[in-house]
Image (cartoon, rainbow, N blue to C red):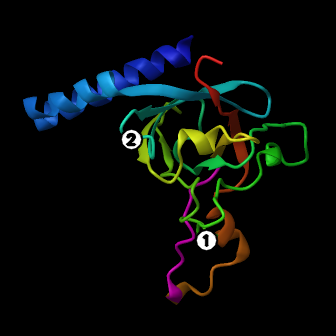
Amino acid sequence: MKYRAGLAVAVTVAMGLVLLVAGSSAQGIWDSFLEEFYEVATAQVLDADGGVLGDVSFFTAEDRIDAIMIVGWFSGLTPGFHGFHIHATGSCDAATERPFTSAGGHLNHAEASHTHGDHNGDLPSLFALETGEAFVMIGTDRATAQSLLDEDGSAIIVHADPDNFGNIPERYGTPDETTLATGDAGARIGCGVVVAAGG
């Protein structure tokens, strides 16, 4: 598949750049990735019309099951920044007034903060090139394979607009409810149900 092949190429290129910049000492990073990390889950992200926007893979390591690495490759996006989150429910129903609301709110454990930017599912934004392509490689210990694949599952959501992570300096006034909940990232334009790798 085009996107899965692109994902493999993107990971290889990214690690190649690390080696180029950091020198031979960074070889261990790549070796570690290949030897220790294994894919635990995937998500194919679709738009509201059912078109494929991209693929996301989730990796973990035997000695780091408390963290995951997220690697994604996208195309067909509007150039610029897009909010990018893990949502709490593994459902991507586009046939609603506002597509993909079935994915619920951002993944968030009971003990976590309820302010946007601190949710377990809050991630750095995607940046789409002028070609509409985006590549992302993120490490997080706010989510685990277990929390991604719990009883009601989870979903990856791509938003139409940039995410301000609820960061409104006091001089601009008090953040409103939408800012605190979603960072003003706008409509949900892409959704992918997270499934166990090989499932």
Residue 47, quarter of picture: top right
Image coords of residue 178 (percent x, y)? 71, 69
Q: Disc 2 or disc 1, which is closer to the eye?
A: 2
Q: Is residue 12 above or below residue 168?
A: above
Q: Does 58 sit above or below residue 118?
A: above
Q: What element carries label 2?
A: loop
**Relative to 59, is 179 above or below?**
below
Name the amino acid, label 2: Arg
Task: Tell me the tag on residue 115.
Answer: 1
Q: Residue furthest front?
A: 63
Percent across and percent down for residue 175 are 63, 79
- Relative placement, left or right, of 124 versus 162 is left
Q: Residue furthest left?
A: 24
Q: Residue visible at 45% across and 46% down?
A: 66
Q: Residue at x 46, y 19 (%)?
A: 6
Mark 2 vs mark 1, CA separation in Å: 27 Å
